[in-house]
């Protein structure tokens, strides 16, 4: 069978009150042997094989399309042609936006649904913001459960025969926020190789800005910077991470600013840009951030990075690759593998033998991801590569820095 055009969709419904955590997959297929059409559906509890049906439509494509669109409307109350303006209705399914190169399997394999897109994860972040506001305003338990269901419908989460836990406290919501932020930093960074980019010079020749506001007010809102300074002041009291030289709230705050949802996407995009003058507005911030990295302990260690693309062909043994952005990794192999299982599809597991990574898990209120950062411009030599099913496993070693 082959999927006809873009007639495939993955749907999800989590209703905590009814203990629903179920998927529904619809596909319009054409037989490669006799060119007849079928509408394929599969449904069930997330993580289980569920039930399936293959409805024949003969050689009548219009009939098959009508049957597909009718099923979609029945399950979502949305018209297929209006799906880009999708509206979630109570007791109906949520449209799950997956990477267009992959199809979901309802969690019957390793993935909870299929390969979640960055846009889908960002929708989950929006619901978490609503949850935080609801918790602060002491909204009813029922409303919290409804919002929690919206989150799990957007970010499918395996829970077996139990219902996913309601996100009823600020700490639970912030833990999910930290997880999604980490997924975006580690796994959805632009990994396309940038060749011919000039090294970025002169950052460490600049005088160290006296405050983080002086360094970063041109790249983000002052309110965000003040939040990071406040968190930095707490970290100073803890002597967090046992720095090799004294750290103040400005230095700690520069790390917090990066790991929040404020600047990392724009910063890394600019670091990878061919327009090398565009990075100049980040110079003062990078001066503080790189100073902080220098003062935190560094050691030779093996880190792991799961990414949502297949890098096997690009990462030839012996080749030196430059990661121009700030790169998030983890010291726990299971964290990287769990990320790939959550996203499904063709992915890459990178084993990174590094010398200068900074462990920021000690700075986090949610250290479970065991996140470490590599400085922008880190250069890595490919040692070896293998394939394990749809996962490319690649080992690299740190050999230098282009900044």
Image (cartoon, rainbow, N blue to C red):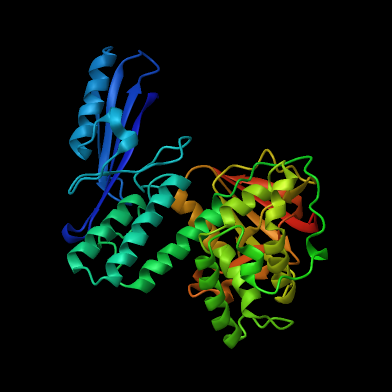
Residue 298 in view here: yes
Residue in view at x 19 percent, y 37 percent: 77
In x, y percent, where is residue 304? 62, 60
Of residues 281 and 41, the one drawn nearer to the viewer in this rendering = 281
Of residues 122 and 372, the one drawn nearer to the viewer in this rendering = 122
Q: Quadrant of the C terminus?
A: bottom right
Q: Is residue 364 above or below residue 320?
A: below
Would you say 197 lies left or right of 169 here? right
Would you say 187 lies left or right of 290 here? left
In x, y percent, where is residue 49? 30, 45
Q: Quadrant of the N terminus?
A: top left
Residue in view at x 17 percent, y 60 percent: 17
In x, y percent, where is residue 125? 40, 56
Give the quarter of the image for residue 67: top left
Of residues 289 and 145, the one drawn nearer to the viewer in this rendering = 289
Would you say 399 lies left or right of 391 here? right
Q: Most extreme residue toward the bottom, as rendered?
A: 237
Give the quarter of the image for residue 115: top left
Would you say 259 lies left or right of 38 here? right
Of residues 390 and 366, the one drawn nearer to the viewer in this rendering = 366
Residue 111 in view here: no
In x, y percent, where is residue 193? 69, 42
Total marks in image: 0
Residue in view at x 35 percent, y 13 percent: 34
């Amino acid at each position: 069978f082959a999927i006809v055009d873009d007639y495939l969709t993955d749907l999800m419904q989590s209703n905590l009150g009814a203990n629903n955590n179920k998927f529904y997959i619809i596909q319009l297929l054409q037989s490669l042997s006799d060119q007849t059409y079928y509408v394929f559906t599969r449904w069930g509890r997330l993580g289980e094989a569920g039930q399936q049906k293959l409805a024949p439509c003969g050689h009548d494509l219009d009939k098959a399309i009508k049957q597909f669109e009718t099923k979609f409307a029945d399950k979502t109350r949305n018209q297929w042609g209006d799906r880009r303006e999708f509206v979630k209705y109570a007791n109906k399914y949520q449209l799950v936006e997956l990477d267009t190169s992959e199809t979901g399997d309802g969690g019957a394999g390793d993935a909870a649904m299929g390969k979640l897109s960055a846009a889908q994860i960002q929708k989950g972040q929006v619901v978490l913001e609503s949850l935080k506001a609801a918790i602060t305003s002491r909204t009813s338990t029922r409303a919290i459960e409804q919002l929690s269901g919206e989150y799990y419908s957007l970010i499918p989460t395996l829970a077996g025969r139990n219902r996913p836990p309601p996100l009823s406290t600020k700490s639970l919501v912030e833990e999910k926020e930290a997880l999604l932020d980490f997924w975006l930093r580690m796994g959805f960074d632009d990994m396309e190789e940038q060749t011919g980019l000039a090294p970025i010079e002169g950052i460490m020749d600049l005088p160290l800005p006296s405050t983080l506001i002086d360094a970063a007010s041109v790249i983000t809102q002052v309110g965000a910077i003040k939040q990071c300074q406040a968190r930095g002041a707490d970290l100073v009291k803890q002597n967090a991470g046992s720095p090799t030289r004294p750290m103040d709230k400005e230095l700690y705050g520069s790390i917090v600013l990066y790991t929040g949802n404020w600047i990392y996407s724009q910063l890394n995009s600019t670091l990878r840009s061919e327009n090398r003058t565009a990075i100049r507005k980040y110079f003062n911030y990078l001066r503080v951030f790189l100073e902080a990295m220098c003062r935190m302990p560094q050691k030779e260690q093996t880190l792991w990075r799961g990414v949502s693309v297949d890098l096997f062909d690009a990462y030839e043994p012996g080749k030196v690759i430059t990661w121009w952005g700030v790169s998030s990794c983890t010291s726990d192999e299971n964290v990287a593998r769990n990320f790939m299982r959550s996203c499904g599809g063709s992915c890459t597991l990178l084993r990174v033998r590094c010398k200068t990574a900074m462990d920021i898990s000690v700075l986090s209120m949610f250290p479970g991801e065991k996140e470490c950062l590599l400085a922008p411009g880190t250069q890595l030599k490919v040692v070896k590569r293998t394939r394990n099913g749809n996962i490319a496993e690649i080992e690299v070693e740190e050999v230098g820095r282009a900044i």
